[in-house]
Amino acid sequence: MYNISEWDHVFKLDPNKTITDADLEKICTSGTDAVIVGGTDGVTFENVTDLQERLENYDIPFVLEVSDMEAIAPGFDAYFIPLVLNSGHKKWMIDVQHQAIKEYADVIEWQDMLTEGYCVLNPEAKVFERTDCSLPYEKDVLAYAQMAEHIFRLPVFYMEYSGTYGDPDLVKAVSRQLENTSLVYGGGITSEKQASEMAAFADVIVVGDVIYDNLEIALKTVEAVKSMKMKDGGPS
Ligand code: 1GP
């Protein structure tokens, strides 16, 4: 299975958004640990493979977070498969993945796949609506984290606040529940301070939208996260 235990910081690029070659180079040479390609709307085979071809110019792992069966392209270093734990429908927990495996099992390199237990915590996020989520209370989030760790034994528990900055106290509380499952935090990071605040608790910080809104700040989050992890006890 693909291993992210050495990652601290990743950028998430939306294939449905435009990024110049110069900006892509800055992202890929920023010192981040990997680039995830993923989005909710308008993800197509064409825009995924276009970004993939451009990422191939750089010596950095690039991973496809699968959100649409029609947009699965071969040749990524790994494939992240979200299971939406707080969705109200089993479709987003098991059915879309089942369908994809029926279609692609013959060509899947199982060791390149990594399953993410997603907990979507921003009710305004597109993914929240698309996957029919309901907003969990703190004790529900903690129980989802415990299920990820002890019941499903998932490699990743992803606190997804996409588009808004989350609650550091909740991230801290979740981090205390997880030992073998990595805690990934993503959502609304728009400053170095926020990046390091979440990096104190989460294993991996995902930085997305700010790449397109303010690249200079996005780039600074790499150092902010890396210094927090050094302070926390050396490189992870
Ligand atoms: C989105 O968690 C990522 O899937 C990052 O969120 O775009 O809000 O930074 P932002």
Image: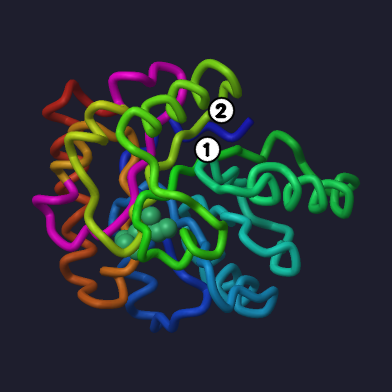
Q: Please, what secondary structure does the residue beneath circle 1 have?
A: strand
- Determine which quarter of the picture holds residue 225: top left
Residue in the picture at 37% in, 71% down = 25
Magenta range: 175-195
Q: Amino acid at mark 2?
A: Leu
Query: Looking at this view, is 221 or 71 the one in front?
Result: 71
Task: Give the side of residue 112 with respect to residue 213, left or right.
Answer: right
Query: Looking at this view, is 103 or 53 the one in front?
Result: 103
Query: Looking at this view, is 111 or 127 the one in front?
Result: 127
Residue in the picture at 55% in, 53% down = 63
Mark 2 in CB contact with mark 1 (< 8 angstroms): yes
Question: Label 2, label 1: how many angstroms apart (C-alpha)?
Answer: 7 Å
Quarter placement of the C terminus? top left
- Determine which quarter of the picture holds residue 65: bottom right
Looking at the rendered structure, the number of numbered marks drawn on it comes to 2
Q: How is the image coloured?
A: rainbow
Does the segment drawn in magenta span residue 177?
yes
- Mark 2 residue crowding within 10 angstroms, few (<14) / some (14–19) / many (20+): some
Task: Give the side of residue 197 with respect to residue 41, left or right.
Answer: left
Q: Quadrant of ligand 1?
A: bottom left
Residue in the picture at 22% in, 55% down = 165
Residue 153 drawn at (x, y percent) = 57, 21
Q: Which residue is under mark 1?
A: 117
Q: Amino acid at mark 1?
A: Gly
Q: Which residue is under mark 2?
A: 154
Residue 133 drawn at (x, y percent) = 50, 52
Q: Please, what secondary structure does the residue beneath circle 2 have?
A: loop
Residue 188 drawn at (x, y percent) = 25, 60
Query: Looking at this view, is 126 or 37 the one in front?
Result: 126
Give the vertical position of 58 relative to 77 (above or below).
Answer: below
